[in-house]
Amino acid sequence: MIRRALLLVLGLLAPALPAAAQGWESGRLREYDAAGRSLGRQEQRDGTTRFYDNAGRATGRAETRGDSTRFYDNAGRAVGRAETRDGTTRFYDNAGRATGRAERRGDSIRLYDNAGRLTGRAEVDGDTIRRYDRAGRRIGEARRQ
């Protein structure tokens, strides 16, 4: 859920992010793996982020109201939520159990699992978000369209 919510997380944390990250709260984003292969896209408008696979098929959506976001699968079933407060976005499954968090750290966003272990980071550079695993290896990127 966190990987698919990059555009959403940037929008939620936008007030706390550096100038390079401003403006990510709306628009289109295409995702790529480390080899440059397209993984799909995200489109955000009017508080709703829609997720699509590489063939253009809808795979889910997220609806944001204030600091709270609800995630839904393609059939409209609730699958999780996110809450943002004080520069931290916390993710929960549909049963309300914490599953991870995203925090601003300097010019990047750090991703953690529920046990507090670093699972990766995302760095914003203009129209590109680069994603790294916990060992610092680049695992993908997303580009604003």
Image: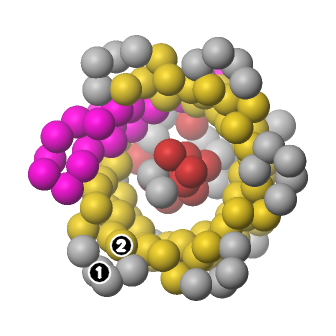
Q: Viewer-proximal residue, 122 or 37?
A: 37
Asked if disc 1 and disc 2 are in contact, CB closer than 8 Å, the reply is: yes
**Quadrant of the image containing the C terminus:** top right
Q: Viewer-proximal residue, 25 or 28?
A: 28
Q: Position of residue 71 (x, y in %)?
A: 54, 73
For residue 62: magenta?
no
Magenta highlight range: 105-127
Q: Specify whether residue 83 is in view.
A: no
For residue 117: magenta?
yes
Residue where numbered disc 2 is placed: 93
Q: Residue furthest right?
A: 56
Element under disc 1: loop
Q: Main secondary structure of the magenta part?
A: strand
Mark 2, other Cα within 10 Å: few <14 / some 14–19 / many ≥20 = some
Instruction: From the viewer's perspective, tell me whether residue 33 is left or right of residue 13.
Output: right
Q: CA distance from mark 1 to mark 2?
A: 5 Å
Element under disc 2: strand
Q: Position of residue 55 (x, y in %)?
A: 86, 47
Q: Residue furthest left?
A: 115
- Which residue lies at the image location 45% right of the left edge and 32% below the top edge? 122
Residue where numbered disc 1 is placed: 96
Instruction: From the viewer's perspective, tell me whether residue 85 is left or right of residue 34.
Output: left
- Disc 2 residue type? Asp
Q: Which quadrant of the figure has residue 47?
A: bottom right
- Disc 1 residue type? Gly
